[in-house]
Image (cartoon, grey):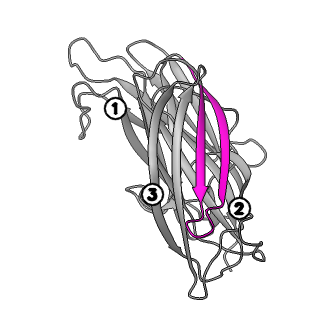
Amino acid sequence: MFTALALAAVLGGTPAQPAGDLKLTNVRLTVGELGPPREGAKLLPGDVLFVAYDIEGLPIDNEGVARYQMAMEVTDAAGKLIFKQDPRDLADFVPLRGGRMPARAYITVGLDQQPGGYVCKVKVTDPKSKAVGNLEVKFDVLKKDFAVLAVYTSHDPKGEISAPTAGQVGQTLYVQFSIAGFERDMKTKQPNVEIEFQLFDDKGLPTLGTPRKHIQDNMSPQQVKDGDGAFALQFPLFLNRPGKFVLQMKATDRVTKKESTYRLPVTVAPAN
């Protein structure tokens, strides 16, 4: 099954378009809500697909309030409705005004979702003019497998405040991610997964002499509940010097010997 939530960021910036000319433009897939472009549209069960786009031509009143409706649905390759989010009335405070708002929609792929092709459709409506903007994004769900997935960055440890995969010296980013598709140990009934963290600089050289490791097993403080097919973790990344880096997360399922590696680019700007 799919779960989804559509959300909008609130940054303005361009002159307003004529009323009734509502468009959803600059559609792209991203790593997390504010991250870089995602490579491809193939997802494993347990992953999250983030769709970024701009709403152009939406009126923002003199008090800086934009009002609109947003709806979303997911269909399979045959056009069968799989998930539907009914139109919701939304209002955002946009003090910079203008006629463009960056927006996001995301879809969480259930661990039991069947492999195949799917289409995500987003519809934004101006409640006054009844102007409508639409977009469609095609994606594929692959067969369930062991993987590091659902990666995004946040400003806080709980992952409630989304952040770009960039910052300036002195900040801390929290890399949120999940491990899915693991097998449980026959005796302990818990996963036995080792995650190795390593940073690489712009020359491809490792910054850590010894990679940082985390082992999720029956000795871990937080146990994985019976029936859960995935567990979430976070890695704190203190930005102490400028440059372009890559965080590599390599997970090994010690039960099946399967491995999965995820590489996340991170850019650090000098402090002002």
Q: In the rendered structure, which amino acid carries the disc numbered 1?
A: Gln
Residue designated by label 3: 88
Residue designated by label 2: 22
Task: Give the residues drawn in magenta, as a range.
Answer: 118-142
Looking at marks 3 and 1 on the same chain, the residue that comes earlier in the sequence is marked by 3
| Alpha-carbon span between mark 1 and mark 2 | 48 Å
Residue designated by label 1: 216
| Residue 58 is one of the magenta-drawn residues | no
Quadrant housing residue 10: bottom right
Q: Residues within 10 Å of mark 3 (few under 14, many from 20)?
A: some
Quadrant location, the C terminus? bottom right
Looking at marks 1 and 2 on the same chain, the residue that comes earlier in the sequence is marked by 2
Q: How many marks?
A: 3
Residue at (41% x, 28% y) in the render: 1
Residue at (55% x, 50% y) in the render: 105
| Alpha-carbon span between mark 3 and mark 1 | 40 Å
Helix, strand or loop at label 3? It is strand
Helix, strand or loop at label 1? It is strand
Report x, y in % for residue 101.
65, 67
Report x, y in % for residue 257.
46, 13
Residue furthest to the front:
129
| Alpha-carbon span between mark 3 and mark 2 | 17 Å
Q: Residues within 10 Å of mark 1 (few under 14, many from 20)?
A: some
Quadrant housing residue 190: top left
Q: In the rendered structure, which amino acid carries the disc numbered 3?
A: Arg
The reply to whether discs 1 and 2 touch (Cβ–Cβ < 8 Å) is no
Q: In the rendered structure, which amino acid carries the disc numbered 2?
A: Leu
Looking at marks 3 and 2 on the same chain, the residue that comes earlier in the sequence is marked by 2
Report x, y in % for residue 59.
65, 74
